[in-house]
Each structure stands twice: as structure tokens, then as C-alpha cells.
Image: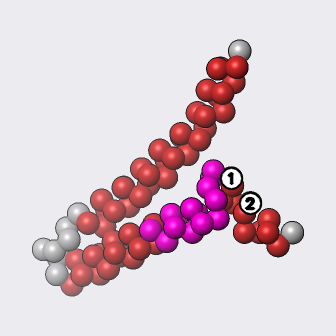
């Protein structure tokens, strides 16, 4: 039961616990860097003009592409087995 708490979600995104930890950590670091750039931009509007929005766009694209790749995989397996 306890193991399931740590593995259910990572498995749902086709990752091991360690892979998910690394991926989530890298996302968090990117979000923190983007957030820091936004704070600095608020004080000094001529700096980091597009950093926040480009960070959000990049991270969103990475998540969407990964999800789409997973959604296609079962369909490809079904097609290949017919």
C-alpha cells in the first residue's frame, strides 16, 4: 500500500519513481528561475522581458508533447498488432 503511494502517479506518466523525481525537480528549478526572472523584471522592467513567458511556454510544451507521445503509444501498439 505504501509503495503504491510513491509509484502510482510516476507509472501513470511512464516513469519510475527516480525518473519522476528528477523530472519534477528539473521542472521546479526552471519554474523558480522563471519566477525569479519575473521578480527582477518587476523591479527592472528592461530586464528579462520575455523570460517568464518563454519559461512557461517551454515547460508547457514539454508536458504536452510527453502526454501526446504516451497517448499515441497504445494506439500504435494496437495498430501494429492487427
Question: In the image, is 5 to the left or to the right of 18?
Answer: right
Residue named by callout 1? 12
Label 1, secondary structure: give it.
helix
Residue 31, visible in the rendered structure: no
User: How many marks overall?
Assistant: 2
Looking at the picture, how far across and down is residue 73, in whole percent? 61, 34
Q: Please tell me whether residue 8 is drawn above or below residue 78 in the rendered image.
A: below
Q: Based on the displayed image, in which of its 4 quarters is residue 77 positioned?
A: top right
Task: Reply above or below: 42 against 53.
Answer: below
Q: Mark 1 Cα within 10 Å, few/some/many (few <14, many 20+)?
A: few
Residue 78 part of the magenta segment: no
Q: Magenta segment: does it hold 18?
A: yes
Query: 51 above or below 72?
Result: below
Q: Quadrant of the N terminus?
A: bottom right
Residue span colored magenta = 12-26
Q: Residue furthest top?
A: 82
Residue name at image x 20 percent, y 71 percent: 48
Task: Give left or right: position of 6 versus 67.
Answer: right
**Residue 6 visible somewhere in the drawing:** yes
**Label 2, on which residue?**
8
User: Based on the displayed image, in which of its 4 quarters is residue 38 positioned?
Assistant: bottom left
Amino acid at each position: 500500500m505504501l509503495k503504491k503511494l510513491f509509484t502510482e502517479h510516476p507509472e501513470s506518466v511512464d516513469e519510475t519513481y527516480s525518473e519522476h523525481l528528477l523530472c519534477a525537480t528539473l521542472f521546479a528549478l526552471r519554474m523558480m528561475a522563471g519566477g525569479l526572472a519575473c521578480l527582477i523584471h518587476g523591479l527592472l522592467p528592461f530586464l528579462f522581458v520575455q523570460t517568464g513567458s518563454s519559461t512557461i511556454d517551454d515547460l508547457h510544451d514539454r508536458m504536452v508533447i510527453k502526454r501526446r507521445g504516451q497517448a499515441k503509444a497504445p494506439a500504435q501498439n494496437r495498430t501494429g498488432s492487427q
